[in-house]
Image: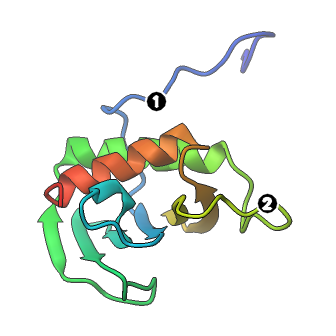
Amino acid sequence: MLLAAAGCRPPAATVDDPIPADFALLFLVDTTDHPDDPRRRRALHVVEPDRTLRAALGPGVTDDLHPPATATITPRDMRELYRLAETARLASAPGTPGNAAPPPPGVPVYRMVLRVDGDRHERVLVAGQQPAADQLLTALVRLRGGR
């Protein structure tokens, strides 16, 4: 059986691909709160395996909150969130930025914790440096009602 030929890549995931049953996501936007810009608000998004989106917004938000249910995510949107989260995870190093230079003042930092197939993956990403993470935030903002 041929698993991979030189120069070949596996097909890109699509929004119709199945996702792991235990997929869950925590996505914290750590920034100075900008209430007029929904992508630059301090926010915590929690996506649960049952397709519940929980969200909390504002300066007092921390990653240890259990926000109220905000929306029920469609299966198609859940697959899209999974695809974006996996893309961001695979394109970045585990854990925290370590010795990386801190982002400029006012640039949001994302803390993403992803649970897939019984494994936990944590990433710290800087807004504007990881397109899939920025797209993931845009999707979460849309799903929470754009506020």
Quarter containing the C terminus: bottom left
Amino acid type, residue under disc 2 in the picture: Ala
Residue visible at 72% across and 61% down in the picture? 94
Q: Is residue 115 above or below residue 4?
A: below
| Percent coordinates x, y for residue 124 in the rendering | 63, 63
User: Residue 129's quadrant in the figure?
Assistant: top right
The residue tagged with tag 1: helix, strand or loop? Answer: loop
What number of labels is visible? 2
Whole-angstrom CA distance, mark 2 to mark 1, is 32 Å
> In terms of depth relative to the viewer, which is nearer, 144 or 8?
144
Q: What residue appears at the point 48 percent right and 69 percent down from the top-left corner? A: 31
Quadrant location of residue 96?
bottom right
Residue that carries the numbered disc 2 in the rendered image? 101
Q: Position of residue 120 (x, y in %)?
A: 59, 69
Tell which residue pokes out farthest to the right in this image: 99
Q: In the image, 98: left or right of 106?
A: right
Q: Is residue 95 shown left or right of residue 54?
A: right
**What residue is shown with label 1?**
13
Q: Quadrant of the N terminus?
A: top right
Residue 29 quadrant: bottom left
On screen, residue 86 above or below 96: above
- Observer-nearest residue: 40 or 142? 40
Q: Is residue 117 visible?
A: no
Graded by Cα atoms within 10 Å as few (under 14), some (14 to 19) or many (20 or more), the crowding at tag 2 reads few
| Residue at point 26%, 67% (across, down) | 35
Q: Position of residue 6 (x, y in %)?
A: 81, 10
The amino acid type of the residue labelled 1 equals Ala
